Amino acid sequence: MTSGWDELTGLTGGKTFTINRVQVKDTDIAIEGNFELPPLAQLSYNDQVFVAMFVRFHGSIKQMEEAFGISYPTVKARLKKIAEKLAFVEITTVSSREVVLDQLERGEITADEAAERLI
């Protein structure tokens, strides 16, 4: 099964591209600018299908083996390759201290409440 996305990635030869106009379907609302695609959308169509199936199977490599007719090492290698393409996505954790200080700065809590939460 192929899609318009698969055709688009074929036309671009897998090179990075940007979107210049976005229109809300069935409306006259449009936004123009220079938009980069989110990291998952930058994957090839086949890699996107693979990731979607992995999520659908709740990370079950056994189900991935069965669905794609490939071995455990092949599933692992493919996931590793995809993960390397997504390596630039940074995931940061915010400390509870930072959350409390942000709430205090926005006036959502008082200084006394902040002090209690930071003890």
Image (cartoon, rainbow, N blue to C red):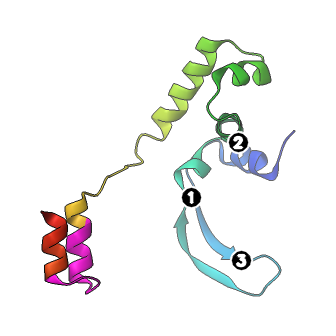
**Place of residue 101 in the rendered image (x, y in percent of width and height, measured from the top left):** 19, 72
Q: Nearer the viewer, residue 73 or 56?
A: 56
Amino acid type assigned to the residue bearing label 3 in the image: Gln
Rounded to the nearest whole Å, what is the CA distance between mark 3 and mark 1?
Answer: 15 Å
Give whichever of discs 1 and 2 has the lower sequence position: 1
What residue appears at the point 27 percent right and 77 percent down from the top-left corner?
103
Residue interval drawn in magenta? 99-111
Circle 1 — which element? Answer: loop
Quadrant location of the N terminus in the rendered image: top right
| 25 is higher (above) or lower (below) than 80 | below
**Place of residue 117 in the rendered image (x, y in percent of width and height, measured from the top left):** 19, 67
**Place of residue 65 in the rendered image (x, y in percent of width and height, measured from the top left):** 71, 18
Quadrant location of the C terminus in the rendered image: bottom left
Circle 2 — which element? Answer: helix
Rounded to the nearest whole Å, what is the CA distance between mark 3 and mark 2?
Answer: 22 Å
Left of 36 or right of it: where is 100?
left
**Place of residue 78 in the rendered image (x, y in percent of width and height, measured from the top left):** 59, 24
Which disc, if any, is residue 23? 3
Is residue 42 part of the magenta span, yes or no? no
Amino acid type assigned to the residue bearing label 2 in the image: Tyr
The 10 Å Cα crowd at callout 2, few under 14, some 14 to 19, many 20 or more, is: many
Give whichever of discs 3 and 2 has the lower sequence position: 3
Amino acid type assigned to the residue bearing label 1 in the image: Leu
What residue appears at the point 49 percent right and 37 percent down from the top-left corner?
85
Read off the residue under disc 1. 37
* Image quarter of residue 22: bottom right
